[in-house]
Image: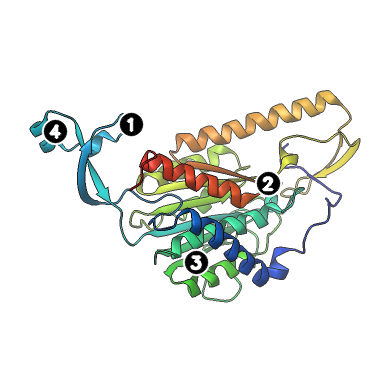
Amino acid sequence: MARAAPVTSPTPRPAPLADRSEAVLSRLQLLVTRKLDGLLQGDYAGLLPGPGSEAGESREYRPGDDVRRMDWPVTARTTTPHVRRTVADRELETWLALDFSASLDFGTGQWLKREVVVAAAAAITHLTVRGGNRIGAVIGTGGGASAPARRWRGGPPPSGPGVLTRLPARSGRKEAQGLLRAVAGTAIQPGRGDLGALIEMLNRPPRRRGVAVVVSDFLAPAEQWARPMRKLRVRHDVLAIEVVDPRELELPDVGVLPVVDPESGELHEVQTADPRLRQRYAEAATAQRATIAAALRGAGAAHLRLRTDRDWLLDMVRFVAAQRHARTRGTTR
């Protein structure tokens, strides 16, 4: 039910992102650089930096520390529990799984949901390449996953029903800008996508431990993508970015509202003046989001929610700050 989108056009907004991708990407880069660089100045960090694999110093055990990192020799010598710190890997590989299913071509706030997906991809790309790391992406469009995956070799990525596209992981700002141009130029196709198949592309072939970021509205049934997410978490730090529009959470009282499912094309007329219908809709939407959050939590993924009617960059900055604070326990490294 929360998939339905009003047929009437929402309030005026800027031209579609694909028509002004260069200008928008330049502006996004400036915004991200000014806000996120100031927050992370002098720190080697991304949205979800890996714990690393090289042994570092030992420190006393604190509640919540991973017991698998216990330093037993030091613990035996001091009779006080100690854990071994690890040094972060200096070359991180980040992969984006970007869901461009038809339900993303909707928005009643300041942005379309697909524009928030591109903006989130731009922020993550900047955080990755600023340390000389590699970033790649897999992109899924609507229409199901019947078509075979393709590799991108420059120019606009292939589009069509059920196309899954892989953009190889590369380092460097020039390559990152090319990746973002390809992402911004992806055309949304009608029909339902397969989020599970998109996430599974990050599991095959197996890659070195790194960061995996899944950006979607997660409106597909949780049983379709929850298992691939759990499998992905075995080898990687996983961040799930959920894109939400306010009309997917509650309906306004505007009388008879024609709505259409952008994935199936089904058209319905809803009497929004009925308070009981609006209440049932809000309750169903709340239950749906709770199911999504529980599935992501069960998969061990960090969860960031971005809305089309809010400052997505501010929400992302707060998320990065919270992750950094949790990682350092409020102390300066």
Is 123 placed left or right of 48 in the picture? right
- The percent position of residue 262, horizontal first and vertical second, equals 74, 49
Residue corresponding to mark 4:
75
Mark 3 and mark 2 residues within 8 Å of each other at the beta carbon: no
Mark 2 belongs to which amino acid? Arg
Q: Residue at x 41, y 53 (%)?
A: 211
Which label belongs to residue 217?
A: none
Callout 1: helix, strand or loop? loop
Q: Identify the mark nearer the N-term, 3 or 2.
A: 3
Residue wearing tag 1: 64
Residue at position x 59%, y 46% in the image: 315
Secondary structure at numbered mark 3: strand
Of marks 2 and 4, which one's residue comes earlier in the chain?
A: 4
- Gap in Å between the C-alphas at discs 1 and 2? 33 Å
Tell me the tag on residue 310: 2
The alpha-carbon separation of the residues under discs 3 and 1 comes to: 37 Å
Between marks 3 and 2 in the image, the one whose residue lies nearer the viewer: 2
Using the rendered image of the protein, determine whether residue 286 is visible from the camera's viewpoint.
yes
